[in-house]
Image (cartoon, rainbow, N blue to C red):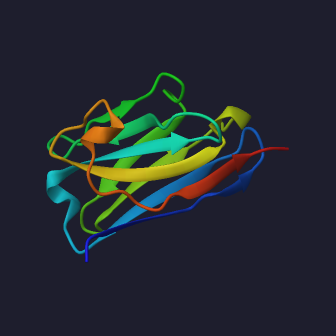
Amino acid sequence: QVQLVESGGGLVQPGGSLRLSCAASGFTLDYYAIGWFRQAPGKEREGVSCISSSDDKGYYADSVQGRFTISRDNARNTVYLQMNSLKPEDTAVYYCATRWSKCGSYYYEYGHWGQGTQVTVSS
């Protein structure tokens, strides 16, 4: 069974850090780009970051550039999103999703999705 499971969310104070994990089962992530998306209540789903399969290059939304870092561990079949200097506006449900080989710009280009993990940044 093909499955993506996100974990690592939680409640953190502004300026804090979290590391999200996206673990795959039932297939190998080696040939897939993995995107992280987020959706806050009443807002559209937005792309946060993506890592390609070929060169492990990370792409970032302007709003998280310099604060978030995406990485992958193919041996563990897992992709990570390190989030530093978190802000209240980062509060959202975070999802990971797959796309064959290269990163795409739009959420509908991605196939398998996880169930999401809640990130809340609040004092």
Residue that appears at 45% across and 40% down: 69
User: Does 110 appear above or below 59?
Assistant: below
Q: Quadrant of residue 72?
A: bottom left
Q: Is residue 68 above or below residue 27?
A: above
Residue 56's spot in the image, x, y percent? 24, 43
Count the labels in the image: 0
Please name the residue shown 50% across and 58% down the image.
116
Image quarter of the C terminus: top right
- Residue 119 left/right relative to 95: right
Q: Residue at x 26, y 52 (%)?
A: 111
The N terminus lies in quadrant: bottom left
* Residue found at the very far front of the displayed protein: 42
The image shows residue 2 at horizontal and vertical percentages of 26, 71
Place of residue 107 in the rendered image (x, y in percent of width and height, measured from the top left): 35, 39
Q: Is residue 71 visible?
A: yes
| Residue found farthest to the top | 62
Q: Using the rendered image of the protein, determine whether residue 51 is visible from the camera's viewpoint.
A: no
Q: For the point 46% across and 49% down, which residue is it? A: 81
Residue 112: where, in percent of width, then height? 29, 57
Of residues 76 and 45, the one drawn nearer to the viewer in this rendering: 45
Seen as rendered, the residue at the extreme bottom is 1
